[in-house]
Structure formats: C-alpha cells, structure tokens
Image: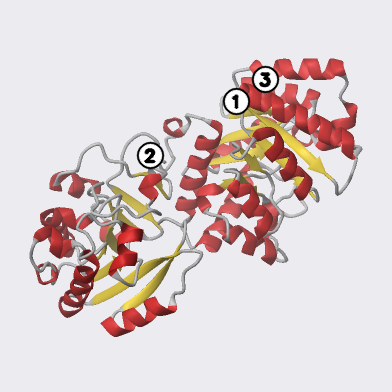
Amino acid sequence: MLIVDSHAHLDFPEFQKDLPEVITRAKQNNVGYIINVGTNLDSSRRAIELANLYPEVYATIGIHPHEANEITDSNWQEFIKLIHNDKVIAIGEIGLDFYKDLSPRPSQKDIFIKQLKLAKEHRKPIIIHDREAHTECLEILKQVMGPKIKGVAHCFSGSKEIAREYLNLGMFISVAGPITYPNASKLRETVKSIPVESLLLETDCPFLAPQAKRGQRNEPSYLIYHINELAKIYGLSVEDIARITTLNVIHLFGLNIISICKKSVKANTKSETIAYPIRNSLYLNITNRCTCKCYFCVTRFSDYVKGHNLRLTKEPSLEEILSAIPQDVHIKYKEVVFCGYGEPTLRLDIIKGVCRYLKKKDMHIRINTNGHANIIANKSVPPELKGLIDCVSVSINALNPKEYQEICQPQFGEQTFDKVIKFIKEAKESLPYVEITTIMRPDIDIKPFQKLAQDLGVDFRARIYNEIG
C-alpha cells in the first residue's frame, strides 16, 4: 500500500530535532512520498532543500496569505527564481484568509493574484488556502485562471456547495485530521458528497493531528487514521482509498512514483488491468467493447475506475484472465464480478469458462450487463448461465424505447429496450437473483423505475451519478 501526504510542513521548527526519524516512520507506515509546502520565501527555500536532501520529498513554493504584507519587490524577485528547481511541483499554499486577517485583505489579494499568474505562466498546479473567504477566493480563481484549474483546495472545511464550486473548476479537494474528530459530522457529510476520485490526503503537519493523536505534533505517519475514517465514509477498503488518492496525486502533480515503493498496491497508471479489487469484491475486465454509447459512461472521460486503469490494448484470453485471478480468490473476496469497460456478454464463451473455474472454488458470481446478451448471441442466453451466474445486474437507465435510445444510444436501434426487458424476464426464470439499476441523474425520479422492477418481479438499485465503481 502506497500513501502520499499531499501537504506537510516538515521545514517547520517542530521537526528540527528528529526529521530523519519522522520520515522513517512515514515510510514504515506506507507513506512513500511527502509534498512539503512552502508558506513564505524562507520556507519555500527550506522546502526545496529538504526535497533535494530526501528523494521521497517534493517541494512547493508559496506565499501564505498570512505573509502577504511581508513581501517586498526584492523578495518577489528571489521567490520567482525558485520555480525553476526540478523538485518544485506546484505553487502553494496561496489564497485568502479572512478568519485571522494577519495581513490586510488588499495585500492578500495582490500576492494571491501574482502567484496565480506565476503558476499559469509556468503551468504549475496550485494549492489553495481558503478560510472564511470562499466567495472572493473563487472569484479571483475564475478571473485569473479560467474555467478549468489544475489545483487543490487544501484542508477543506467548507460546505457541500463550496466543495461543488471547486469541483466544477476541475480542482481536487484535500482533507486533514479534522475528518476524524467526533464533532466533525458536518465535515464528514460534506466529504461524502465529494467523489473519491477528486480527493487527496494530507496531514498539514505539524498541525491538526487526528483524533487518536490529538494534542500531539502531527506527522505524515498518522495518515492511516485519515484513511480508516475515509474508508468508512465512502464504504471502500483502506487499500481502495490509498490507491485512489495516490493516483489522484499523480494526476494532479504529474508525479511518476508508482513503481518505486515495492510495498505499494499498484495504481496501474500505465499497465492495463484484467482483475481489480474494489472493497471486498474482485472485478473482471474482459472487454472494452460495448453495444451502448451512454452519455454518462466513464469511458468517455477517463481510463480509470477506483484507481485501476481499465483501458485494454487487447482482449485477454481465458488463460490470461484465469492467471489474473488470485489462487485464494475464495478466501480474499466475497464475490467475483464481470464488470469492466465494456459489455461482458460480448464474450459469452469466456464468461462460461471463467465461471466453471470459479464455481470449483464455490465463488459467488455477479455479472453487470446492459442486457443485450440475447441480441448479441441471437438466442436466449440466461438458461446457459444457470448454475454459473448467481446475480445479474442490468443497467437499464430508461423507461421506454425512445428514452433508452436517447440516453444509452444502443447500436441495435429502438427495438433494444423491449429486448432488454425480455432478457430481464428470462433471467428471472433461470437465475437466483436479478436486479435492474439506473444512474441517479440530477433530474430523475426513481419511483417509476421502482415500479418497473416491481412489475418485472426483480429488485431495483439506484447508482450514484458520477460515482463509478
């Protein structure tokens, strides 16, 4: 398992006596990399020195809003020279702080704008400090950086609405120790509304130690407490949170750090994935081909699902799929799911072969499908899956042929919807459990879908919009 602390202040005096031990403890607790964040000219210099001294440390340079009034023209010229160091990966932390107001607000805004322009000129991501200044901070960001911004709102403590504004700009959001505090229920609800694919981990050390270490100096090794809490919030495993947030760091800061930590759960940033774990299920990605072109499909905007690269360069053979399944799959996972970047029933014979192997291990097997199997095979498929598939989950997403054609864009035309309904009925007759699902689009009413499921005698499950996997 590989974790990245995306925001630390190891150059602060609190770490002066034992920094080597702090970094060793971080690595012992799977924190393979640390981004040390500058807060003024001297701090930014020290961040670079640490990054050059420790291979696992990267640096950012920034003038914190508290320091805004201390920057002279000469200081600024010295500051901008720092951006050319190879280990400087971002500009931050920068922004506005109207809570403490340690610098006059006009000075905060001026230095914030100058640093944003510097980041834009050098194409560097930004790390935003926004405290009690949401409206002004977002307004400046939009004016200077434009509608899409590569950056992160650090140590987020705002509302769901503010989070959504940052997300709409294409930014990430990071959370620190307060996510573990007993009285932070509102923050946990806000974080739950943030897609995990937009989340980073940070300590903000030496500040904001997690609840289990509260009152102590914070340090990167304590990130495991954040991950445990986030796993509960998202209903994911600790490994899922680590893998996804590490991949998010790579995407934001452009780091190539995966293969260096031998203990890591690979985030698969380059190699394609056949078998991939999410929670306590093992998913099988056997094809990228699909007979639908749903407008919301993840394949339109990303190669990744929960930190796994599912873009195949070729379809795996039966032997390759079986080799990708752990020998102890029946011990590690509660089920195996055919669900990748395409429609699995396009490879019906492969499904049968894999199922026969898995049934020898007494595995529960689910298939996530668009329900086109009968059209693809030109025959009734569910009877052939009897004794092999335990659960069929049909993504239907519409209530009539016209709506289905508009949303899912099946290659077989408007007749497809009625044939999907027929497939569902046949599956109910042959297989132990059948459900229909739909994406919870912002404008959708799920009651008609619930009634459709009731009429068909199957279960219904709503899937969260923009939450893949």
Q: Quadrant of residue 161?
A: bottom right
**Alpha-carbon span between mark 3 and mark 1:** 11 Å
Q: Residue at 66% across / 39% down in the picture? A: 7
Mark carried by residue 123? 1
Q: Which residue is located at x 54 percent, y 63 percent? A: 232
Secondary structure, mark 2, is: loop
Image position, residue 202 (x, y; %): 64, 44
* Three-letter code for the amino acid on which mark 1 is drawn: Arg
Which residue is at 22% across, 71% downward? 418
Q: Is residue 149 above or below residue 300?
A: above
Image quadrant of residue 362?
Answer: bottom left
The answer to whether residue 398 is visible is: yes
Q: Is residue 206 visible?
A: no
Depth order, front residue of 283/170: 170
Q: Quadrant of the C terminus?
A: bottom left
Whichever of labels 1 and 2 marks the residue nearer the N terminus, that label is: 1
User: Considering only order in the chain, which callout, 1 or 3, is on the residue closer to the N terminus?
Assistant: 3
Marks 2 and 3 close (CB-CB < 8 Å):
no
Under mark 3, the amino acid is Ile
Image check: 174 left or right of 215?
left
Within-10-Å neighbours for mark 2: few <14, some 14–19, many 20+: some
Q: In whole angstroms, how far apart are the C-alphas of marks 1 and 2?
A: 25 Å
User: Can you identify the residue that label 2 sits on?
Assistant: 268
Q: Which label sits on residue 260?
A: none
Viewer-side label of 1, 2: 1
Residue 384, placed above or below residue 64: below
Mark number displayed over residue 83: 3
Q: Is residue 155 above or below residue 352?
A: above
Q: Position of residue 463 (x, y in %)?
A: 42, 65
Q: Secondary structure at mark 1?
A: loop
Residue 254, image x and y in percent? 52, 30
Residue closest to the eye, 211 or 320: 320
